[in-house]
Image: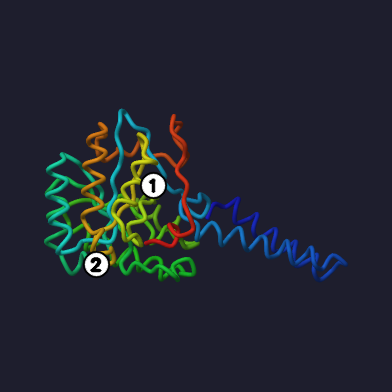
């Protein structure tokens, strides 16, 4: 967490306790105390919030381009088909892989890299509910157990995405030590919970703009009606609209919104629950 934010939170909690115990302003004191804790928690559990970690939320485009990111692989059924789809559309993507699955399917990790796509770390076990409570050792294990299986001595991994966008208080320092950059998204497609590919594609197409990071998923957690189909239709629709699917360079990555003629996409409560 940024030092100034951590200092602020500690100050608020300390001030709240002093007010509650040492003065007549007991109610105000507890409100200040709880408010300081709330700030800390929100920095950890709200996706794309800056503070606990610098999160890339978009990139500076050179043209009409977007960044397609695919989480939760590799998958023996989906990954080969996705590589064929991407090749057919001359599109590049970044696959954020779960370490356990990369360990189980090393040949798919090699196939992704051989096809010219980028690979990022998506933790080793994909902890969704408890990662914001993870201590230093747990956070370190989620990184260090995953990296050997997704690097496979063939390519350095420089990108990381948290499960469901959740961070731990120790994540910033551990990422910096490993040369990893945390990547969020601009558009959350909702394919992790969605049952109708038309709704998912409509959400992406309606909110797309140059420089957007599109979050989608592969694997058994995605509904059978949505698996592959949603990504295929997004590729087809955006390609018709003249978009290129690229892997942005490091100097293009941004943690603040890029000015655009189109409005910023909104995220519903249901989408925040989707993995």
Check the image and name the residue furthest to the right.
24
Q: Residues within 10 Å of mark 2 (few under 14, many from 20)?
A: some
Distance CA(mark 1)–CA(mark 2): 22 Å
Is residue 77 depicted above or below 87 in this figure? below
Give the left or right position of residue 79, taking residue 222 as reference: left
Is residue 92 depicted above or below 110 in this figure? above
Q: Quadrant of the C terminus?
A: bottom left
Nearest the eye: 227 or 81: 227
**Image location (x, y in percent) of residue 130:** 45, 71
Considering only order in the chain, which callout, 2 or 1, is on the residue closer to the N terminus?
Answer: 1
Task: Find out whether the residues at labels 1 and 2 contact each other: C-beta distance under 8 Å.
Answer: no
**Image location (x, y in percent) of residue 2:** 54, 52
Any mark on residue 154, and which? none
Is residue 245 depicted above or below 111 in this figure? above
Please identify the quarter of the rendering in which residue 208 is found.
Answer: top left
Residue marked by disc 2: 220
- Secondary structure beneath dot 1 equals strand
Is residue 178 depicted above or below 59 in this figure? below
- Secondary structure beneath dot 2 equals loop
**Image location (x, y in percent) of residue 80:** 12, 56
**Image location (x, y in percent) of residue 95:** 25, 53
Give the left or right position of residue 186, taking residue 218 as reference: right
Nearest the eye: 106 or 94: 94
**Residue at left offset 13%, top offset 55%:** 81
Any mark on residue 187, and which? 1
**Residue at left offset 38%, top offset 41%:** 206
**Residue at left offset 19%, top offset 47%:** 117
Image color mode: rainbow
Nearest the eye: 87 or 34: 87
Q: Residues within 10 Å of mark 1 (few under 14, many from 20)?
A: many
């Amino acid at each position: 967490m940024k030092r100034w934010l951590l200092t602020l939170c500690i100050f608020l909690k300390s001030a709240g306790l002093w007010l509650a115990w040492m003065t007549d302003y007991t109610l105000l004191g507890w409100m200040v105390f709880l408010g300081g804790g709330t700030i800390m928690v929100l920095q950890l559990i709200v996706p794309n919030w800056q503070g606990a970690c610098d999160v890339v939320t978009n990139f500076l485009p050179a043209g009409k381009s977007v960044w397609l990111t695919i989480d939760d692989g590799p998958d023996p059924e989906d990954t080969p088909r996705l590589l064929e789809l991407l090749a057919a559309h001359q599109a590049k993507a970044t696959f954020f892989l779960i370490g356990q699955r990369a360990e189980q399917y090393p040949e798919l990790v090699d196939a992704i890299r051989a096809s010219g796509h980028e690979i990022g770390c998506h933790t080793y076990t994909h902890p969704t509910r408890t990662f914001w409570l993870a201590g230093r050792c747990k956070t370190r294990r989620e990184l260090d157990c995953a990296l050997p299986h997704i690097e496979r001595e063939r390519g350095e991994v420089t990108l990381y995405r948290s499960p469901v966008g959740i961070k731990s208080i120790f994540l910033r320092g551990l990422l910096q030590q490993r040369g990893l950059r945390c990547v969020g998204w601009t558009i959350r497609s909702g394919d992790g919970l969605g049952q109708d590919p038309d709704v998912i594609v409509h959400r992406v197409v309606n909110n797309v703009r140059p420089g957007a990071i599109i979050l989608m998923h592969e694997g058994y957690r995605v509904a059978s009606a949505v698996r592959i189909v949603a990504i295929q239709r997004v590729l087809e629709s955006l390609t018709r609209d003249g978009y290129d699917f690229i892997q942005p360079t490091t100097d293009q990555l941004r943690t603040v919104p890029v000015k655009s003629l189109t409005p910023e996409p909104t995220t519903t409560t249901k989408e925040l629950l989707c993995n």
